[in-house]
Amino acid sequence: FDQPGFTIIYDNDMLYFGGTYRGMKHGLGVELTSDTVYEGEFSLDFKVGKGYMKFPNGSIYFGDFQNNRTHG
C-alpha cells in the first residue's frame, strides 16, 4: 500500500509528488497548487510535522504543521 515517489494529479489544480498510503498523501511530499507550495510531512492526507509553505503574497513559513495548518 505504501508507494514512495508516487505522483498524483488532482482535478482541482493541485499536483502532489511523494509518498502515499491507500491513495492518500502520506510521508514526505510536495504539494503544488495554483497559489501555494508546500514541502514536508503528510499523514493520511493532512499536512503534519515539519515543513515549509510559500504563500501567494510571497511569504514563507518554516516550521510545524498540524491538521493542514501552521502550528507553533
Image (tube, helix red, strand yellow):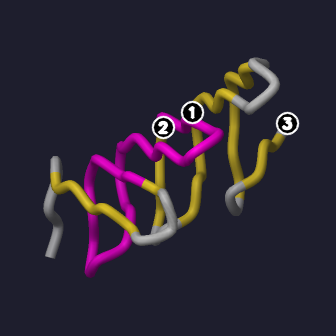
| Apparent side of residue 50 relative to residue 23 in the rendered image (left or right) | right
- Ranked by sequence position, the earlier of labels 2 and 3 is 2
**Mark carried by residue 40:** 2
For the residues labelled 2 and 1, the Cα–Cα distance comes to 4 Å
- Disc 2 is placed on an element classified as strand
Q: Which residues are magenta?
A: 15-39
| Residue at the disc numbered 3 | 72
Tell me where residue 40 appears, x and y as whole percent: 48, 37
Tell me where residue 61 appears, x and y as whole percent: 73, 25
Q: Nearer the viewer, residue 64 or 25?
A: 25
- Is residue 51 one of those drawn in magenta? no
Characterize the magenta stretch by its predominant secondary structure.
strand
| Residue at the disc numbered 1 | 51
- Ranked by sequence position, the earlier of labels 2 and 1 is 2
In this view, 68 is above or below 2: above
The image quadrant that residue 58 belongs to is: top right
Count of all numbered marks drawn on residues in the image: 3
Amino acid type of the residue tagged 1 in the rendering: Gly
| Apparent side of residue 7 relative to residue 61 in the rendered image (left or right) | left
Quarter containing the N terminus: bottom left
Amino acid type of the residue tagged 3 in the rendering: Gly
